[in-house]
Structure formats: structure tokens, C-alpha cells
Image (tube, rainbow, N blue to C red):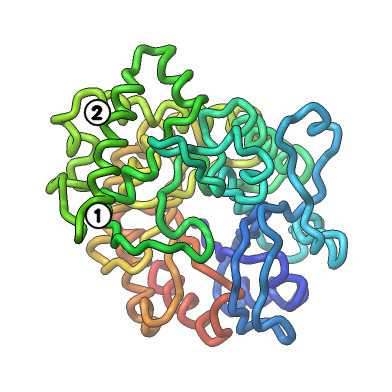
């Protein structure tokens, strides 16, 4: 069974490879490390670090040494984090010591969530119905953005040959909580956030138009709804069966409904192109959430083109975790890898029993593995909670 923990390269640098491998393998009972190889900005409280209790990673950088021969003619190119030059290539260290540590290597790879690249390439980001840019989200319809992600994964897999690559954000992203210091005095509800996230950039317009999707009518409809939500004194629900009904929540608006039915195409095809270009020695899996359709993910279609899916079930009771995994298994079929992502944050997880119950519910429902979040962000004593969860599914 795949048993891994999401980990940052600076965690490995701070703790030392030998020490972190021993903790993951012997204390937590894991057999894989999922290291961030492409990541975004943030501010992290680092309880494990002896020196860096607060850490601010560079925005939109990669944590490996790119093969320049692959990037010479690309419009969008990666930037290697200064961390790699200053403190070492931890992906190379993990791969070279794979037999010694006994840990498999998974590359946790953020794809289109990249504010640095979005600011540099505003013609390739998602844009709402008013044409306003979402700089944090490169658009999956943009040829240059697609080329960037496909080449990124090809570079990682051909140079380092990890056991797995985990694709985070190869899709459209939401509006709220994706950038820094966001201000919302309206009080957006879930459907408002979704409407603001819908992309009508030139690339989506062209791609959808080629197959007859009424994208301009859809844009006008969405712009009308956004204008209305901005006029209300307090938020109101317009679509009472959203998000449970999926895109059918918008069935009374045919042009919007047709656009939403098409919207998964650029995401699905991008996942297929990533997998096709990757070294076959590395399994390619998608990181997704419940209701992934909100980001344009068609789980069944994507599952046919990649090697599996990791479904994050944060802050859910065990019964709900089981439901998500059963739904995921039904979508991707019995042969593909299906993992569950569980967070080890307090108070979401108050002790080992609830983490163990969630892990057991996932495995009982058909999960092939568990990823725990996140090594450097939790106190060392919670590794014992992880071990309790591993023992529960043993």
C-alpha cells in the first residue's frame, strides 16, 4: 500500500535526509515521501525546524534543477528556487538515496497555480466574465500554459525518474482563498465564488468556439449574475441545488449549461498530454477534491488518461470519507490507483483515533493508499498519530 507524507524540501534540509527518512519510515510507518517540486507562495509556521519557525517560500518556483535543453523555445519557463542553489537539490538527494532510505519518491507538483508566472504572462491566465485577470491561475486552455505544464512534468520524470508525480491544480481554480490578503465585503456564497471563477479568456473563447459552444452567451449570463450579486445588500442563493446537482444546477440557462459541459475538455486533455509526455517509469496521478467538477475536472474522463487519483478528504467524518472514496472508485474503475489525502491539523484532528478512523474508512471503501499532510507543519508528536492510522489499516 502507498503510504506517504507531503513534505517540503526545506523540511529535508532542516532535519537532514537521514533523520527525516528514519522518522517517516520507522516512526510514522510510511514507505513514500511526497516532496514539493513546484510550489507557490505562502507563510508557514514550521514547528519542526530548529531555526525557521516562520518560513516564506519564493512564489511560483521549482525545487529541482530544470534541464535547460527542454526549455529553450518555451514562452513560459520555470524559475529554480534560490533554495536549491543555496541548500541543495533535495529531489536529487532523495532519488540518489532511494535504496538506502527505503522510501519511494513522489513529486508533489503544482501546475497552473502560479502567481509569479501569471504576473509575467497575463495573456495566459484565467479571466472572469468581465475580462478581469486571475493572476494566480494560468489557464488550461492556453497553449503556452499547457506547454509549460507538460514540459515541467516531462523534465521531472525524465531527469529524476520518481516513482510518482502528483498533479495539483492542472485545472481551473476558484475565486476565493487563492491569492494573498483578499478582501470581500460582499460575503460571497459558494455559487457566487463559482461564477466569479469561470474563465472567458481569449484561449477559452477560441477553444470552445471551435466546437460550437455558445461561450459569448454563457459569458453574458455569468456577467449578469455577477452584476446582480454585487447589487444585493446581503448575499442570496440563486441556485438552491448548487453544488449537489453539478452543472445541472444551471439547467435553466442553456448557454451556460453547454459551456459548463464543455469546460472539462481543456483540463482532461491537458492531463492526457502530461501523462503521454512523461517518462513511463513514473506514475502520473491527479490530486483532486470532492466536487472536483467545480474546477473543470471530469474524474471519469481524467482517470482514463492518467494512472490514478488522490482525493483529499480534509475535515470530513469517516462516513463522508468513505463516500468520497467509493464515488471516486466508481468513476475511475478498479484498475487505477486511488489514494486519499488526510490532514493532520488541530483541531480538525484532535487525536490519533479520528485520524485512524478516517484512514480505515478510506481503505475499507477501496483506497489503495494514504497521503498525510504535512510533515513540516505539525509537531513531531503527531507522527505517532500517523503511525496509529497506518496500524489501523495494516
Q: Nearer the viewer, residue 376 or 214?
A: 214
Q: Residue at 48% of width from left, 56% of height from top?
A: 178
The residue positioned 80% from the left and 32% from the top of the image is 70
* CA distance separating discs 2 and 1: 27 Å
State the residue position of label 2: 257
x then y, percent, for residue 295:
39, 42
Residue 95 visible in the picture: no
Disc 2 and disc 1 in contact, CB within 8 angstroms? no
Depth check: give the residue in front, 306 or 243.
243
Q: Quadrant of the C terminus?
A: bottom left
* Residue at the image point whose x is 13% and y is 30% from the top: 252
Residue denoted by label 1? 323
Tell me the SS state at disc 1. helix
The quarter of the picture where residue 233 lies is bottom left
- Residue 368, label in figure: none
Mark 2 or mark 1: whose residue is earlier in sequence: 2
Q: Is residue 385 left or right of residue 87?
A: left
Q: Is residue 191 left or right of residue 356?
A: left
Amino acid at each position: 500500500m502507498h503510504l506517504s507524507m507531503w513534505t517540503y524540501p526545506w523540511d529535508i534540509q532542516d532535519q537532514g535526509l537521514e533523520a527525516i527518512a528514519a522518522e517517516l519510515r520507522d516512526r510514522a510507518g510510511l514507505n513514500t515521501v511526497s516532496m514539493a517540486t513546484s510550489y507557490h507562495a505562502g507563510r508557514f509556521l514550521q514547528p519542526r525546524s530548529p531555526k525557521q519557525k516562520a518560513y516564506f517560500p519564493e512564489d511560483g518556483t521549482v525545487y529541482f534543477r530544470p534541464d535547460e535543453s527542454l526549455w529553450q523555445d518555451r514562452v513560459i519557463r520555470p524559475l529554480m528556487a534560490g533554495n536549491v542553489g543555496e541548500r541543495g537539490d533535495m529531489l536529487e538527494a532523495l532519488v540518489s538515496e532511494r535504496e538506502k532510505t527505503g522510501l519511494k519518491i513522489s513529486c508533489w507538483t503544482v501546475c497552473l497555480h502560479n502567481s509569479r508566472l501569471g504576473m509575467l504572462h497575463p495573456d495566459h491566465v484565467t479571466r472572469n466574465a468581465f475580462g478581469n485577470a486571475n493572476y494566480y491561475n494560468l489557464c488550461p486552455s492556453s497553449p503556452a500554459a499547457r506547454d509549460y505544464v507538460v514540459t515541467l512534468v516531462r523534465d521531472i520524470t525524465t531527469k529524476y525518474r520518481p516513482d510518482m508525480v502528483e498533479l495539483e491544480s492542472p485545472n481551473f481554480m476558484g475565486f476565493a482563498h487563492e491569492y494573498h490578503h483578499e478582501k470581500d465585503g460582499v460575503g460571497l456564497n459558494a455559487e457566487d465564488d463559482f461564477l466569479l471563477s469561470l474563465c472567458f479568456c481569449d484561449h477559452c473563447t477560441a477553444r470552445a468556439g471551435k466546437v460550437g459552444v455558445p461561450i459569448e452567451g454563457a459569458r453574458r449570463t455569468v456577467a449578469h449574475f455577477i452584476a446582480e450579486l454585487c447589487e444585493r445588500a446581503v448575499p442570496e442563493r440563486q441556485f438552491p441545488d448548487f453544488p449537489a446537482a453539478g452543472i445541472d444546477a444551471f439547467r435553466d440557462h442553456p448557454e451556460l449549461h453547454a459551456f459548463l459541459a464543455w469546460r472539462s475538455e481543456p483540463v482532461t486533455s491537458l492531463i492526457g498530454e502530461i501523462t503521454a509526455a512523461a517518462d513511463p517509469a513514473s506514475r502520473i496521478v491527479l490530486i483532486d477534491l470532492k466536487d472536483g467538477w467545480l474546477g473543470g475536472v471530469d474524474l471519469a474522463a481524467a482517470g482514463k488518461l492518467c494512472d490514478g487519483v488522490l482525493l483529499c478528504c480534509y475535515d470530513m467524518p469517516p462516513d463522508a470519507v468513505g463516500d468520497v472514496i467509493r464515488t471516486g472508485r466508481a468513476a475511475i474503475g478498479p484498475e487505477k490507483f486511488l489514494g486519499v489525502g488526510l490532514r493532520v491539523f488541530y483541531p480538525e484532528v484532535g487525536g490519533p483515533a479520528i485520524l485512524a478512523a478516517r484512514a480505515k474508512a478510506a481503505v475499507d471503501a477501496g483506497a489503495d493508499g494514504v497521503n498525510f499532510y504535512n510533515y513540516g507543519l505539525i509537531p513531531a508528536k503527531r507522527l505517532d498519530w500517523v503511525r496509529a492510522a497506518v496500524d489501523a489499516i495494516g
